[in-house]
Image (cartoon, rainbow, N blue to C red):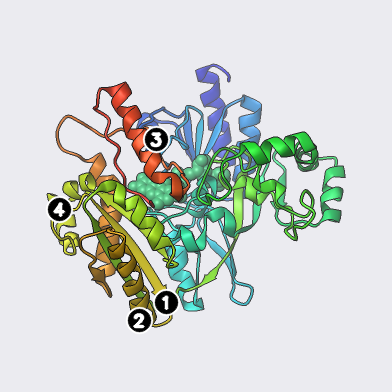
Amino acid sequence: MKDTVSIYSQLDILRKSLDGDLKYDKVTSTIYSTDASVYKEYPLAVIWPKNRSDLKKIVAFAAEEKVAITLRAAGTSLAGQVVSSGIIVDISRYMNKILGINREEKWVKVEPGVVLDELNISLKNYGLFFGPETSTSNRCNIGGMVGNNACGSHSIIYGSTRDHVLEISAILSDGSEVLFGPIGKADFSDKCLQNSLEGSIYRKMNEVLGDPLNQREIREGFPDPAIPRRNTGYALDLMLNNEIYQKDSVQKFNLCKLLAGSEGTLAVITEVKLNLVPLPPPAKALVCIHLKKRNDAFLANLIALKYNPAAVEMMDDRILELTENNISQRENRFFLEGRPKAIVIVEFVRETITEVDDTVSAMTAELKADGYGYSFPVVKGKDILKVWELRKAGLGVLSNMKGDPKPVSLIEDTAINVEQMPQYIADFAATGHRFFNGKVIPVSNSVP
Ligand SMILES: Cc1cc2nc3c(=O)[nH]c(=O)nc-3n(C[C@H](O)[C@H](O)[C@H](O)COP(=O)(O)OP(=O)(O)OC[C@H]3O[C@@H](n4cnc5c(N)ncnc54)[C@H](O)[C@@H]3O)c2cc1C
């Protein structure tokens, strides 16, 4: 990077060439120095691009000046994904249009700055919605969801963002514009022959993925494929599940699977084509299993999963206690009975309420027979939202804890095979005790 004075004069020149905005004053730099994580770095500048042409100029500038660029959507990342000392490129201000909806083929094309809730409101009249969700759905953007491969409570049925990304238009580091999407064998071979950065990406991928030794290492070394909700580096293992590298597969090769979850490190996303799903069936109920022991939550979860729930979430006693004195959360605690060590919330969605009731009865009977739970309130109608509000508030109330001790998110979004959860939590607690003299307490507030 050039010296400070000269880089600012270069930024001034860049600003004049943009349709969007560019700032490098102290206030802006301070506002953009954090995301929802504990990390903090002051960026050199912040740019709000208006279009693809702006983005191409920014990429060219970054290459020329050797400055890092970090794409930022709503900035709700929890692990410092959008914190950088380089240039922050905020796509949420201008690049937030829905570009096209196809009801018959069930897809929507959007710019990366579209807010998830706003997208789903627009899709409601079509009887469709975008399946994956996050607790931050009222502000997080599709670009950020793709970057983090986001998913939420209903990931049991809808999977993660990656599962619904059909195509991505992107800008590569040399400024070239590329469309990533599903391609057949012949197209794949053609791409590998192209004399361009795109061509070299396909060639390099083929070099890595086509090597039998690498294939074995990837298949054996990557996390358990039975865990659908995981973000462990680049999803190279999923890049093997297609007709090019797996004889019996009918899936097409699609680099979108790699871009999803790559946290903005591979390309600048300018448009995304997303798969849509029909709105969920109308009948819904929650069962709020009250447990006397925290570990029972992980065992009760295994029973709940047998009944095809739409969502299963857990809140432990520490989170529940913190909501006790929270004015906005007090009314959302209406369903609590006594002082449970943990609550497991199980959501059932079916075509009729009779089907829901039958499933609730069957699951509750099995839980009782196995000795899990002392109370099983069933919540229906508008009250369902209150229960989910309480669950969503978990992370917030934890962060705003009164007094000197403050929670620090050391291990975020760990993905564990549900069968191994009881042992994992026990091991984790023991490790905390060993290294932090008993001052580390695992707090569970997630899909068990
Ligand atoms: C209270 C709270 C609750 C949360 N709950 C959940 C949850 O339930 N599930 C979940 O998955 N996450 C959750 N998160 C994390 C976060 O909200 C989600 O991952 C969300 O999808 C991030 O969206 P965003 O718009 O804020 O993206 P950002 O944080 O702005 O960006 C996310 C990533 O995407 C990249 N990116 C953004 N735009 C582009 C682009 N145009 N091109 C290339 N890369 C781009 C960024 O560089 C970054 O790496 C939670 C966070 C908080 C604070």
Residue 145 lies left or right of residue 196; in this view the side is: left
The mark that comes first in sequence, 1 or 4, is: 4
The reply to whether discs 1 and 3 touch (Cβ–Cβ < 8 Å) is: no
The mark that comes first in sequence, 3 or 4, is: 4
User: Does any portion of residue 408 appear in the rendered image?
Assistant: yes
Q: Residues within 10 Å of mark 3 (few under 14, many from 20)?
A: few
Residue that extends furthest to the top in the rendered view of this protein? 3
Could you tell me which residue is drawn at 31 percent across and 60 percent down? Answer: 370
Residue receiving disc 1: 350
Could you tell me which residue is drawn at 38 percent across and 30 percent down? Answer: 39
Distance, label 1 to label 3, CA atoms, is 35 Å
Residue 2 lies left or right of residue 336; in this view the side is: right
The amino acid on which the numbered mark 1 sits, given as a three-letter code, is Arg
Residue 390 lies left or right of residue 212; in this view the side is: left
Distance, label 1 to label 4, CA atoms, is 31 Å
Q: Position of residue 66 (x, y in %)?
A: 61, 25
Residue 191 lies left or right of residue 412; in this view the side is: right
Q: Position of residue 311 (x, y in %)?
A: 40, 62
Q: Which secondary structure lies at badge 3?
A: loop
Q: Which secondary structure lies at badge 2?
A: helix
> Residue 411, labelled with which disc?
3
Residue receiving disc 2: 353
Q: Residues within 10 Å of mark 1 (few under 14, many from 20)?
A: some
Query: Of the residues tagged 3 and 2, which is closer to the observer?
Result: 2
The mark that comes first in sequence, 1 or 3, is: 1
The reply to whether discs 2 and 4 touch (Cβ–Cβ < 8 Å) is: no
Q: Which secondary structure lies at badge 4?
A: loop
The reply to whether discs 3 and 4 touch (Cβ–Cβ < 8 Å) is: no
